[in-house]
């Protein structure tokens, strides 16, 4: 019997996954040398309440991959509709990602978005391989909710809560 999973067209798979709406996060950190790094992720979830753990997935081909793999701490900023352009910038290689956005910095110098729907500050607990991505598991040491609604990613575009999908 043929293994059908090996026959799956990557474009079809991506299109099918795009039918599942997901939140949009901008994940940030500061390297040991003090350089700021970040990426956009829609693969984010709570993992455990006790202890408080979250997970976020990072593409191994991302320029910031080695930095996040070695990071002691990182911040997950849950994006709002106002962050759509910034999320696109953080999803692009080679951009000066921190040139825009009104980032503030925590006591350790990690960038966070004060107007995010939520900000979750984590210690890197574990890095788990997952195909062409890794799963960063973070132990939450601080979290706060903002007042704005989150933005969703659906079928290759941003979807605001309360809108109907095309």
Image: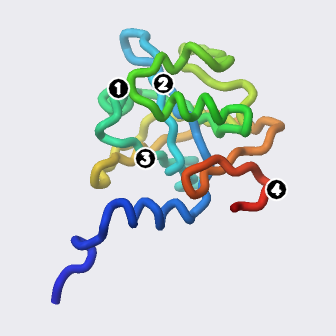
* Image point (67%, 25%), residue name: 113
Q: Position of residue 87 (x, y in %)?
A: 58, 34
- Asked if marks 2 and 4 touch (Cβ < 8 Å), the reply is no
- Asked if marks 2 and 1 touch (Cβ < 8 Å), the reply is yes
Q: Position of residue 31 (x, y in %)?
A: 40, 18
- Identify whether 2 is placed above or below 9: below
Q: Mark 3 or 1 closer to N-term?
A: 3
* Image point (33%, 47%), residue name: 133
Helix, strand, or loop for circle 3? strand
- Identify whether 23 is placed above or below 166: above
Q: Mark 2 or 3 closer to N-term?
A: 2
Residue toward you, 60 or 8: 8
Give the residue number, with chain letter if any, for mark 3: 57
The alpha-carbon separation of the residues under discs 2 and 4 comes to 32 Å
Give the residue number, with chain letter if any, for mark 2: 29
Q: Position of residue 104 (x, y in %)?
A: 66, 16
Q: Mark 4 or 3 closer to N-term?
A: 3
- Asked if marks 3 and 1 touch (Cβ < 8 Å), the reply is no
Question: Quick one: label 4, few (<14), some, or many (20+) residues within 10 Å?
Answer: few
Helix, strand, or loop for circle 4? loop
Give the residue number, with chain letter if any, for mark 4: 162
Q: Which numbered marker is on residue 67?
A: 1
Q: Can you tell which quarter of the image residue 137 is in?
A: top left
156 vs 57, left or right, is right
The alpha-carbon separation of the residues under discs 1 and 4 comes to 37 Å
Eye-nearest disc, 4 or 3? 4
Q: Residue furthest top?
A: 33
Q: Position of residue 84 (x, y in %)?
A: 65, 36
Question: Quick one: label 3, few (<14), some, or many (20+) residues within 10 Å?
Answer: many
Check the picture and name the quadrant holding the C terminus: bottom right
């Amino acid at each position: 019997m043929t293994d059908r999973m090996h026959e799956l067209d990557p474009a079809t798979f991506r299109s099918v996954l795009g039918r599942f709406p997901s939140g949009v996060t901008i994940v940030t950190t500061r390297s040991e040398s003090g350089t700021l790094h970040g990426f956009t992720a829609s693969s984010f979830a709570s993992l455990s309440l006790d202890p408080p753990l979250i997970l976020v997935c990072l593409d191994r081909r991302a320029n910031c991959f080695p930095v996040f793999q070695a990071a002691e701490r990182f911040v997950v900023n849950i994006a709002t509709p106002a962050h759509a352009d910034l999320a696109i910038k953080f999803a692009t290689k080679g951009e000066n990602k921190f040139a825009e956005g009104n980032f503030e910095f925590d006591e350790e110098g990690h960038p966070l978005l004060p107007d995010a729907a939520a900000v979750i500050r984590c210690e890197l607990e574990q890095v788990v391989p997952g195909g062409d991505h890794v799963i960063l598991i973070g132990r939450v040491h601080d979290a706060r909710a903002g007042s704005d609604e989150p933005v969703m990613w659906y079928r290759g575009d941003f979807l605001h809560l309360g809108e109907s999908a095309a």
